[in-house]
Image (tube, rainbow, N blue to C red):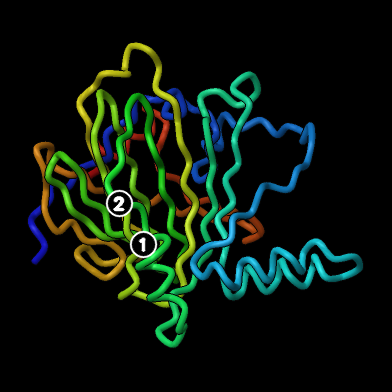
Amino acid sequence: GRSSSRRATPVRPESPCAQGQMIALAVFLPCFTPRAATRISRPTRLPVWPAWQGVALGVASQLPGPFRSWADRLEDAFGGRVAPIQFDPREADPFILLVHHRHAFRPLDFLRPLFSAAIMPEGFPAHPHRGFETVTYVLPGRAGLVHRDSEGCRMRYGDGAVQWMTAGRGMLHEEMWDTGASVDAELYQLWVNLPPRSKLVPPRVQLLLPSTAPAGGAAAQVQREGSTPVRTGRVIDEVSADGAVRVRGIARPPAEEEAAAAEA
């Protein structure tokens, strides 16, 4: 069953992006300044979940002609890749890493049990984090992750939900794919460096639900709270007047946050 979580406006993260900088999933419109791209690069694509499909599409993408475009479309549709994008700290501080996952866990994939048992489980078993934050955004309609950590917390989230985890002074956590939720899984995970003064803050986890999702629904559930209660909130979903631009935000500037709290 779902334990009761303390509902509140999400704690302002320790990282500088809470003070108005742009991140992959949240743009603070009042202080957003468009900038031209300095370069465009194709990230490394690692074939996994399912690996055999990822390998086949990876080979096809190296062939001349239209094969790369076809392979990319099939990869988007059917999964089989993880694409890590390492940032240059001189250009992107405090952002460290952005990873795109697109996977499929089909019940009739006869190679899936073999790969899981002999090569790699379906997720990431317990591993340490320290001194930074991870922001994990699951695309709407896709399966996400089941999270457990050394603070005692357990949760599952997907379908437009966001988990914001502050590792601080250090924690172990486990991220396993929620294969029971859907065949298709897709998410982005952003690593954000903490400033020196916040490197040793106590670990905590925040969970943001889609703006239209019911509390305790399928999108996200806190199954057990740890030593620090999980704070929950809502993803900020805003659409421009003409409908051409849609922004999903995960934090507000301090002044807006205080105004929203006062109205509530």
Mark 2 burial class by Cα count in 10 Å: few <14, some 14-19, many 20+: some
Residue 85 spot, x, y in % from top left: 60, 41
Point 73% across, 48% down: residue = 42
Quadrant where the N terminus sits is bottom left
Number of callouts: 2
**Residue 42 visible in image:** yes
Asked whether 125 or 148 is in front, the reply is: 125
Residue farthest front in this picture? 118
Quadrant where the C terminus sits is top left
Point 79% across, 31% down: residue = 38
The reply, left or right, for residue 151 in relation to residue 181 is: left
**Which quadrant of the view contains residue 79?**
bottom right
Helix, strand or loop at disc 1? loop
The reply, left or right, for residue 144 in relation to residue 46 is: left
Three-letter amino acid code at the position of disc 1: Pro
Asked whether 157 or 65 is in front, the reply is: 65
Three-letter amino acid code at the position of disc 2: Pro
Point 36% across, 62% down: residue = 121
**Residue position for label 2:** 125
Instruction: Determine which of the numbered discs, if any, sits on residue 121 in the image.
Output: 1
Instruction: Determine which of the numbered discs, if any, sits on residue 134 in the image.
Output: none
Whether residues under marks 1 and 2 lie with C-beta atoms below 8 angstroms apart, the answer is yes
